């Protein structure tokens, strides 16, 4: 989809997969707008999700896959952090025992 920057009028292309993914990350149930950042001047142009819906629907499968990968990575990172914390606590406990 083509976006025209409201500020500098530059036209740039948006990948609907990326837009769908970003919309997911907003954690809003039904976001009405997507904030497209102009690559030239960094101004934010608000895009109506409703107007992009057809293109988002066309890429729904790819968006879903990207979101699933992202959630998986996030869950993995969380689990790793938890495991690291647990290992640290256990190491500490062992240290205490050794001192006694
Ligand atoms: Zn611009």
Image: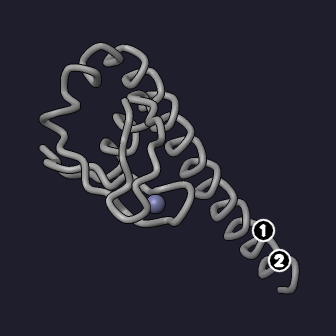
Most extreme residue toward the front is: 9
Quarter containing the N terminus: top left
Q: Toward the viewer: 28 or 52?
A: 52
Q: Quadrant of residue 23?
A: top left
Q: Position of residue 40 (x, y in %)?
A: 56, 59
Disc number at residue 43?
Answer: none
Q: Quadrant of residue 54?
A: top left
Disc number at residue 91?
Answer: 1
Quarter containing the C terminus: bottom right
As displayed, is residue 17 above or below residue 70? above
Q: Position of residue 41 (x, y in %)?
A: 52, 65
Left-right relation of 61 to 57: right
> Separation of disc 2 and disc 1 at Cα?
6 Å
Q: Toward the viewer: 25 or 96?
A: 25
**What's the residue at 64%, 61% (across, down)?**
86
As displayed, is residue 94 above or below residue 100? above
**What's the residue at 54%, 52% (across, down)?**
78
Marks 2 and 1: CB-CB under 8 Å? Answer: yes
For label 1, being within 8 Å of ligand 1 is answered no
Q: Position of residue 34 (x, y in %)?
A: 28, 49
Disc number at residue 95?
Answer: 2
Left-right relation of 86 to 16: right
Element type where label 2 sits in the image: helix
Neighbourhood count class around disc 1 (C-alpha, 10 Å): few under 14, some 14–19, many 20 upward: few
Tally of marks: 2
């Amino acid at each position: 989809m083509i976006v025209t920057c409201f500020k500098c009028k530059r036209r740039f292309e948006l990948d609907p997969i990326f837009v769908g993914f970003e919309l997911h990350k907003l954690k809003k149930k039904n976001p009405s707008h997507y904030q497209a950042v102009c690559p030239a001047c960094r101004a934010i142009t608000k895009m109506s999700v409703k107007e992009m819906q057809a293109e988002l629907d066309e890429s729904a499968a790819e968006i879903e896959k990207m979101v699933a990968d992202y959630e998986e990575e996030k869950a993995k990172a969380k689990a790793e952090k938890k495991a690291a914390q647990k290992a640290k606590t256990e190491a500490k406990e062992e240290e205490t025992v050794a001192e006694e």
